[in-house]
Image: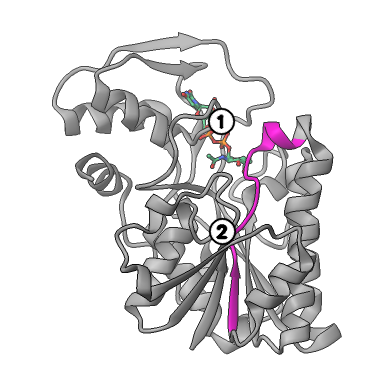
């Protein structure tokens, strides 16, 4: 089938594109290359993937890209929480208007299903763990608000217009091609980058905070299942491993892998950080058949090896 991946030149999108091509699909990518990179698709034959450089804020571009597609994977977004606090209008335009544009295009072009990249940010800082999809969303940032609103749109589209919609609430995704260089990069990408370069690692707080880290290939698996399982339409799913790891545990694993002690400096906790995060993934397991396969240490090894 022909599929569209918005944000397909980005971290998660480029892994999804690789898998979809391997499964024999015709893949079109829409990416404005603001954080996505051509190099993220460079391992693929240029003839195999159609890259449209364009913006999800531009409805006509999105509409043209959706033409002839059976499934749209909507991964394009500005993924930074702090950016959304500083620039709520731009964040809204890309993350929420962009999602509406995808849904309008899907309706106009007869797309069968839209799979939406949502976020654990919809849960905010309410401390109850593990997070279940039937808990009330309580986002505390523009980013979280945009993601829950986008999800509501996606889940309403089946009833309103007959376009199937599935929302995947990603927890802390890590893996190759995640950019370690921005101040808001995922902690694993930063730690691995520093460990490889032999540079000092900064831990904000005591390192006992924990996250539900999930390897990017498992997130790809979730997307493929979300596109194919018929009963998934109209549903939201947590996508994590259903286990949490502290930063101190990560550091111990990294020391084992690089086989030398790491230089670690502690700084005060980052403002607005939550302490712990953990997904209940039983809904994804039962309804999608989702089974995360890559253990954290294995994922770290692959990241360092790659
Ligand atoms: C994740 C998402 C974010 C949003 C948020 C919602 C990522 C990359 N970010 O932020 O988009 O969905 O969840 O809750 O998935 N840390 C250090 N040293 C560093 C970098 C980070 O100690 O060099 C700490 C940081 O203070 C935090 C933890 O590591 O306690 C995880 O930070 P993160 O930015 O990787 O992810 P998180 O969960 O804050």
Q: Is residue 230 left or right of residue 149?
A: left
Q: Nearer the viewer, residue 59 or 196?
A: 59
Q: Residue 289, can we see it?
A: yes
Q: Residue 242, can we see it?
A: no
Q: Nearer the viewer, residue 285 or 95?
A: 95
Say which mark, if any, is on residue 7. 2
In the rendered image, the vertical position of residue 189 relative to residue 167, given as above or below? above
**Residue carrying label 1:** 184
- Callout 1: few (<14), some (14-19), or many (20+) C-alpha neighbours within 10 Å? some
Residue 287 lies in quadrant: bottom right
Q: Residue at x 43, y 33 (%)?
A: 180
In the rendered image, the vertical position of residue 254 relative to residue 242, given as above or below? above
Magenta segment includes 83: yes
**Quadrant observed for ligand 1 in the rendered image:** top right
Residue 157 lies in quadrant: bottom right
Confirm or reject: label 1 Cβ below 8 Å from ligand 1. yes
Magenta segment includes 243: no
Q: Position of residue 185 (x, y in %)?
A: 51, 34
Q: Position of residue 151 (x, y in %)?
A: 74, 64
The span shown in magenta is 71-84
All told, the count of numbered labels is 2
- Callout 2: few (<14), some (14-19), or many (20+) C-alpha neighbours within 10 Å? many
Secondary structure found at label 1: loop
Q: Residue at x 37, y 60 (%)?
A: 217
User: In whole angstroms, how far apart are the C-alphas of marks 2 and 1?
Assistant: 19 Å
């Amino acid at each position: 089938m022909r599929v569209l991946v918005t944000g397909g030149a980005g971290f998660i999108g480029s892994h999804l594109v690789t898998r979809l091509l391997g499964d024999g699909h015709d893949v079109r990518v829409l990416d404005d290359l603001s954080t996505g990179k051509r190099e993220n698709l460079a391992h693929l034959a240029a003839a195999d993937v159609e890259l449209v450089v364009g913006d999800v804020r531009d409805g006509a571009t999105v509409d043209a890209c959706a033409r002839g597609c059976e499934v749209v994977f909507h991964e394009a977004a500005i993924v930074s929480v702090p950016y959304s606090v500083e620039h709520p209008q731009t964040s809204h335009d890309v993350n929420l208007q962009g999602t509406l544009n995808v849904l309008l295009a899907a309706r106009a072009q007869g797309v069968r299903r839209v799979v939406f990249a949502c976020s654990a940010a919809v849960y905010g800082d309410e401390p109850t763990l593990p997070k279940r999809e039937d808990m009330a969303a309580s986002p505390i940032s523009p980013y979280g608000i945009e993601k829950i609103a986008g999800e509501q749109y996606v889940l309403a589209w089946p009833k309103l217009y007959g376009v199937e919609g599935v929302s995947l609430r990603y927890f802390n995704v890590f893996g190759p091609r995640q950019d370690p260089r921005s101040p808001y990069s995922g902690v694993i990408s930063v730690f691995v980058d520093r460990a490889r370069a032999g540079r000092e690692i900064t831990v904000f707080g005591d390192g006992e905070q924990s996250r539900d880290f999930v390897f990017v290939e498992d997130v790809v698996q979730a997307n493929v299942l979300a596109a194919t399982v018929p009963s998934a339409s109209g549903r939201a799913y947590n996508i994590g491993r259903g286990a949490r790891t502290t930063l101190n545990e990560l550091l111990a694993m990294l020391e084992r892998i690089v086989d030398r002690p790491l230089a670690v400096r502690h700084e005060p906790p980052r403002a607005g950080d939550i302490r712990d995060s953990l997904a209940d993934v039983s809904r994804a397991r039962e309804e999608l058949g989702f089974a995360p396969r890559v253990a954290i240490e294995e994922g770290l090894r692959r990241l360092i090896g790659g």
